[in-house]
Amino acid sequence: MIVLCGHGNYGKNILSSTEMISGEQKNIYTVDFTEEMSVKDIYYSYDAIIKGVDEKVLLLCDIPGGSPANAALLYKKQHKNVRVFTGLNLAMLLTLALGETIDDSVKSAINSIKEL
């Protein structure tokens, strides 16, 4: 299971872009972070999606130190099946959607940053 979160509708929008390229994704969920939400609200949004899931969960957030990432780290502390990554970008999510491991996906994301 993969849960995406970022500022505004980042998760929903990056999932939409991924599905445009790779087709519908059934195991990827999104949490929108809006201005009126607190870290606690985001935490509970994660819990509503993840609660009772025994499989490994990837929480992918936009930037380190942001509210979505801070909530994800709090969630991870209480749930051993959760891993948290920041720096979510389209290259990273697309490789995951196409079946790559998270480790290979992170490498792809890093390698996708180039000056042209």
Image (spheres, helix red, strand yellow):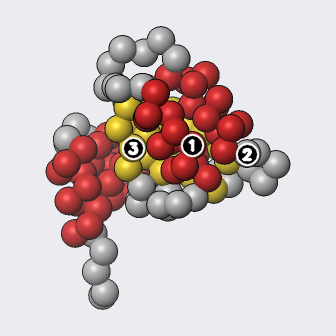
Of 78 and 13, the residue lying toward us: 78
SS at mark 1 in the image: helix
Q: Does the residue at mark 3 contact the one at mark 1 (Cβ under 8 Å)? A: no
Residue 67 in the image: x percent, y percent? Answer: 61, 53
Quote the CA–CA distance across marks 2 and 1.
Answer: 9 Å
Quote the CA–CA distance across marks 3 and 1.
Answer: 10 Å
Judge from the rendering whether residue 24 lies leftward or rightward of residue 81; answer left or right. Answer: right
Q: Report the disc number at residue 84.
A: 3
Q: Earlier in the sequence, mark 3 or mark 1?
A: 1
Residue designated by label 1: 71
Q: Mark 3 is on which residue type?
A: Val
Quadrant of the frame with the N terminus: top left
Q: Report the disc number at residue 38.
A: 2
Q: Residue furthest front?
A: 77
Q: Quadrant of residue 96?
A: top left
Is residue 83 visible in the rendered image? The answer is yes
Q: Residues within 10 Å of mark 2 (few under 14, many from 20)?
A: some
Q: Mark 2 is on which residue type?
A: Ser
Quadrant of the frame with the C terminus: bottom left
Residue appearing at x 22%, y 37% in the figure? 99
Q: Does the residue at mark 2 contact the one at mark 1 (Cβ under 8 Å)? A: no
Judge from the rendering whether residue 96 lies leftward or rightward of residue 36; answer left or right. Answer: left
